[in-house]
Image: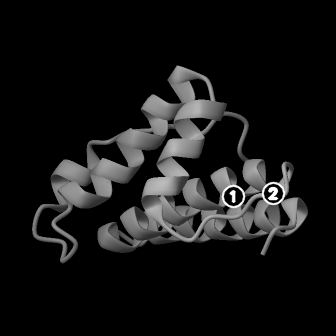
Amino acid sequence: MGDFQKHINLAKEKLRATFTAYENKQHTVVGDLATKVVEQLVEAGAAKEGEHFGDHVTRHDYSNKNFPPEINRAMRKIWFAYGDLGYDGDKWQKGKNCNVQPKGYN
């Protein structure tokens, strides 16, 4: 999937689902979907250059080399907040406290 617009559309769809899951207090779903939103946005950036990644390490490397530090800090915060959830929801409060606020989302 090397198409920029397709990755943007997937990111928007997953972001809407993330907000719905948050409203429904489905905290592990929020963590999972927020991570996928970030991944789709990184993939969109890479698609502009004809690149595509299949693993987290390559995505992290690309992000660190191609996005401003403040974007990477927010991305890492989301990626690691999901890990802080314990993946099975037993530490949801820690993940909930991640508090990364999107700007201008409707």
Q: Tell me residue 9's x, y (percent).
A: 81, 66
Residue 15: which quarter of the image? bottom right
Amino acid on which disc 2 is placed: Ala
Please tell me the numbered disc located at residue 43.
Answer: 1
Would you say 72 lies left or right of 27 here? right
Q: Is residue 101 above or below residue 24?
A: above
Horizontal and vertical percent position of residue 12:
73, 62
- CB-based contact (under 8 Å), mark 1 and mark 2: yes
In the rendered image, which quarter is residue 28 located in?
bottom left
Q: Residue at x 25, y 52 (%)?
A: 95
Instruction: Give me the residue at 61% from left, 23% from top.
Output: 68
| Image coordinates for residue 59, horizontal then vertical, percent | 54, 54
**Which dot marks residue 22?**
none
Alpha-carbon neighbours of circle 1 within 10 Å: few (<14), some, or many (≥20)?
many
Element at badge 2? helix
Corner quadrant of residue 14? bottom right
Specify whether 64 is left or right of 82: right
Residue type highlighted by circle 1: Glu
Q: Quadrant of the N terminus?
A: bottom right
Of residues 71 and 62, the one drawn nearer to the viewer in this rendering: 62
Badge 2: residue crowd in 10 Å (few <14, some 14–19, many ≥20): some
- The residue that disc 2 covers is 47
Q: Residue at x 84, y 49 (%)?
A: 49
Question: What color scheme is it?
Answer: one colour
